Image (cartoon, rainbow, N blue to C red):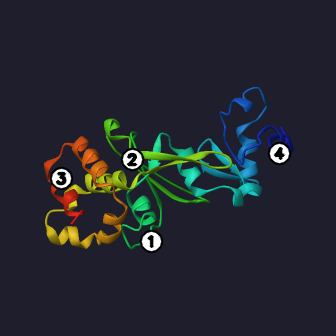
Amino acid sequence: MKYDDLTKIIKAPYFSRNDALLIDQKLLDYQISLWVQKGNLLRLKNGLYAFEKDKERIKSEEVAAFIYEPSYLSLESALALYGFIPEMVYAYVSVTARINRKFTNAFGTFLYRHIKPELFWGYTETKTEYGHYLLAEPEKALLDYLYLNLSKIRNETDFYNIRFNLDAINEKIDVDKFQKYLSAFGMNKMKVWALRCLQ
């Protein structure tokens, strides 16, 4: 297969090596490796690629969803987006029902933290031109963060050091939804710090 043939078959800016459109095509692994070396393709992770010519059309958020499913953006990424923490976030941080993973590619660093399958909810879907991504609701992003960092929050000083913007939290959080979501976690220690966020 020639590179031009690949661009005619795959219309999306990114694709899987196992894409149904490629099943009957004579696409060899060495050809993909060569196109990556030449800069025609960007490796997102093993078996997943993007066309370099389309790089500007691709959102990093949709890459986060594409390279490790199922997952949704949450934790520091969502907290920064909602203004709940002051720091800039250097990576796209998601939660997943799968094992923890980390990937780095041309679109950034992507971190995935494991959460129990029964807690994999509380997100909204955003459609993009070529795909989609999932983003935690404000209430769930905050609770996901507390849940996965609970061992680091031992006292009031630890809580203070997170530097939550409590004004922004109280402005954007739906209290009834927050308390309903909180009850689903079923952790008394977490409840203490979660309710502290509403003060």
Callout 3: 10 Å neighbours few (<14), some, many (20+)?
Answer: some
Callout 4: 10 Å neighbours few (<14), some, many (20+)?
Answer: few
Q: Position of residue 160 (x, y in %)?
A: 22, 72
Q: Is residue 141 above or below residue 118?
A: below
Residue at which label 2 appears:
100
Amino acid found under the numbered disc labelled 3: Lys
**81 and 42: which is toward the camera:** 81
Nearer to us: label 2 or label 3 = 3
Callout 2: 10 Å neighbours few (<14), some, many (20+)?
Answer: few
Nearer to us: label 1 or label 4 = 1
**149 and 4: which is toward the camera:** 149
* Residue at horizontal 60 percent and vertical 50 percent from the top: 44
In space, the residues marked 3 and 1 are separated at their CA atoms by: 27 Å
Q: Contact (CB < 8 A) between labels 3 and 1?
A: no
* Residue 88, disc: 1
Q: Does dot 4 land on a helix, a strand or a loop?
A: helix
Amino acid found under the numbered disc labelled 2: Asn
Furthest residue toward top: 24
In space, the residues marked 2 and 3 are separated at their CA atoms by: 25 Å
Residue at which label 4 appears:
3
